[in-house]
Image (tube, grey):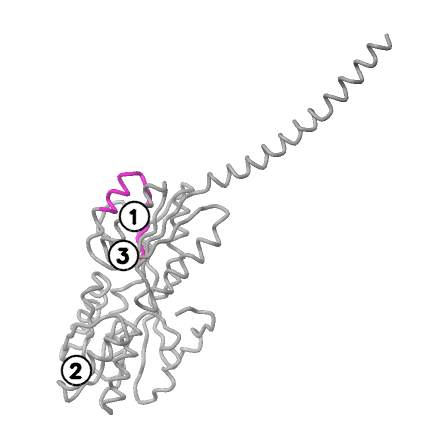
Amino acid sequence: MKNLVKLFVFLVLIMVPVLVACGDSDDASGEDGGESDSGDKYKVGILAPAVTHGWVAAVAYHAESRAEELSDDMDYQIHTSTNASEMTSQLDDLITWGAEAIVAFPQWEGMEVPIQRALDEGIEVVNFDIAIDVDGVYRVAGDNYDMGVQGANYVVDKIGTEGEVVILEVPSAGSVSELRTSGFVETMEEIAPDMTLHTYATQFTREDGLSDFADILTSMDHIDAVYSLDDETSIGALQAINEAGRTDIQVVTGGGGMQEYFEMMPENEDIWIQSALYSPAMVKDAVDIAVDLLNGEDVEAETIIPTTVVDRENHEEFLDEESPY
């Protein structure tokens, strides 16, 4: 009997650590389960242009900022590229990674075929800003056409219905330039048909705004207003006006919402400086929509953010020291 008791005690002593180990194993399994849950997060890819422009830099900043805020629910990869070919390659990488949704901000033509391929793979695509002409793509953008409408109304309000107006279009920007320019031209035809419009091509940089507008100033003796599509281009144009000592120009418009440009508005009392607000922070809406789609929520095919006009009379409402743009 004593031997049986000893055997029982011996077996108990052996089983206790085994049971404890089993308990530890269950806890570890719970932790692994948590990691597995994190592995079940949505996978969202973000494609943006490389930083060639302050507004573009801010788009990438706000996109990544929002993705980080949503990181409890999603894993993300953000890629930047310098041309359509590079963005196409990055899109292929996202497909291989297993992206379930892609937020794409292309600045070049030629993305239709790769975007269609992503859709064919069952990936939700949210197009930010410049339009991709593919059925099934969701889109978030500012109202580019209305920016042109507001620009025309602003110019007429400041100089009247007759004068010499320079349009600084940016053909390389695709639909953005087309819409902003057509909104301006068509509205001007309606409200000021006697206005003389002169169209020149430039880029969305202050350097191009400076050099291109310096050339324009030498070729035109009188200009009443400048319809520029972009704040950085406008900063360059204003520098050219300053350096040329021109005093005939009464209005310079812009677009985007750049803090540096806002700060110039009250400093230039002889020129009305205007910006049609097109905030890069709108890309956060695109990231949100990608997650909403993956959650099975109903989403409008197109989300258009209304235009807000900023000049020296209201610029203080839009100053933001934390803004990267």
Q: Quadrant of residue 194?
A: bottom left
Q: Residues within 10 Å of mark 2 (few under 14, many from 20)?
A: few
Compared across the picture, whether 38 is left or right of 18 comes to left
Disc 3 to disc 2: CB gap under 8 Å: no
Residue type marked 2: Asp
Residue type marked 1: Leu
Q: Which residue is mark 1?
A: 91
Q: Pick whichever, 90 or 242, lies toward us.
A: 90
Disc 1 to disc 3: CB gap under 8 Å: no
- Indicate which disc, 3 or 2, sits on the residue closer to the N terminus: 3
Residue type marked 3: Pro
Q: Which quadrant does the C terminus fall into?
A: bottom left
Q: Residues within 10 Å of mark 1 (few under 14, many from 20)?
A: many
Q: Within the magenta stretch, is there residue 74?
A: no
Q: Residue at x 86, y 7 (%)?
A: 1
Q: Residue at x 22, y 58 (%)?
A: 108
The Cα atoms of the two marked residues, 3 and 2, are separated by 30 Å
Q: Which residue is mark 2?
A: 215
Q: Give coordinates of residue 188: x percent, y percent.
A: 19, 74
Compared across the picture, whether 45 is left or right of 118 comes to right
Q: Residue at x 32, y 45 (%)?
A: 93
- Indicate which disc, 1 or 2, sits on the residue closer to the N terminus: 1
Judging from the image, what secondary structure is the residue with disc 2 in? helix
Camera-nearest label, 1 or 3 = 1
Marking on residue 106:
3
Q: Give coordinates of residue 311: x percent, y percent.
A: 35, 79
What range of the chain is rendered magenta? Answer: 114-128
Q: Within the magenta stretch, is there residue 115?
A: yes
The Cα atoms of the two marked residues, 1 and 2, are separated by 40 Å
In the displayed structure, 131 sits above or below 291; it is below
Judging from the image, what secondary structure is the residue with disc 3 in? loop
The Cα atoms of the two marked residues, 1 and 3, are separated by 11 Å
